[in-house]
Amino acid sequence: MTQHVVDALSAGSLDALLALGIALVFGVMHLVNFAHGELIMVGSYVILSFAGLPWPITVLLAVFSVAGTALLMERVAFRPVRHASPTTMLVTSFAVSILLQSLAVIVAGRRPKGTSFGAGLSRPVVIAGTRVALVDIVSIAVAAVLVGLLVLFLKRTWTGVAMRGAAEDFTMARLLGVDANLVIAAAFIMSGVLAAAAAVLLVAQTGTVSPTMGLQPVLIGFVATVIGGIGTLAGAAVGGFVLGVVTVVLQEALPLSTRGYRDAFVFGFVILVLLVRPGGLFGSRALEERV
């Protein structure tokens, strides 16, 4: 039981980080940034390139690289189409995603590459008489710290309060003097930091890096955001934990002959949640169309 609880919390923590990264940008721009997965890919390749350095330096390089890529993405790709239709911004996010994947293929090739980064985290630790992987404990701790810092930032800093106001009513926030460029840039930078953290955890868990590795995480993050209530940070975090827990529970509860269909059951659960709560677990005024 201890093993199952740790696995569920670890999976939920990673899914919550993915969902929060997507929800931050959606809150201020009403943009589902499907290029968020490529931010994870960029961070993973930075980790692969500098895996020989001490791990704190490698992690810092990944964080700054991904945050810088996210800021550049906002400035070059999304700012020019900020006032366009949601469809245009969505297509732009897909274009950025494909562009970054193609650049990764050109630079590093299509084949997945292995790395020993985080190999020490695979060793087991004993909790309540049960041996669990250290990387699962680290995932839970990292998610808890980052969520706590995010809450403090949003509640105790001027930029964080401005971001919350923009998420509720972007037009009114601008009328009150909020700098739209600053708020949106801050959202992308914070989204990049969360993507870098997810990249560190994914590389430590899997030990592999590939140009398309961000596709599944961004899908999971989007689904978790929808479950929680798209446009709400609390909903995104809760949705991520719920999705992770359900995935682990089904993996253990399903008969061996049907475990290959686990993802089908997971998305069946998502459909049931949305049938009961079409707006997700949490509602949000952020869903109102921004002028």
Image (cartoon, grey):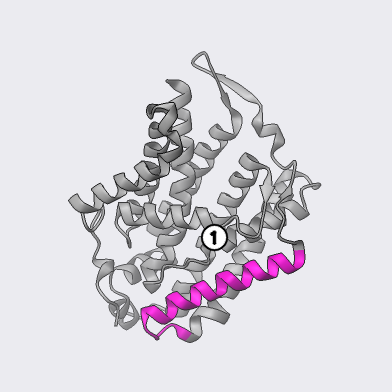
Is 61 on the left or on the right of 17, as rendered?
right
Question: Whole-percent x and y of residue 7?
Answer: 48, 31
- Of 250 and 123, the residue lying toward us: 250
| Residue at image point 45% right, 21% down | 2
Is 115 on the left or on the right of 42, as rendered?
right
Question: Whole-percent x and y of residue 194?
Answer: 53, 55
- Of helix, strand and loop, which one carries label 1? helix
Question: Is residue 92 part of the magenta span, yes or no?
Answer: yes
Question: Is residue 196 part of the magenta span, yes or no?
Answer: no
Q: Which residues are magenta?
A: 81-107
Question: Whole-percent x and y of residue 16?
Answer: 43, 48
Q: Is residue 152 above or below residue 189?
A: above
Give the residue number, with chain letter if any, for mark 1. 37
Is 265 on the left or on the right of 109, as rendered?
left
| Residue at image point 60% right, 55% down | 213
| Residue at image point 65% right, 33% down | 121
Q: Residue furthest right?
A: 52
Question: Whole-percent x and y of residue 233?
Answer: 36, 56
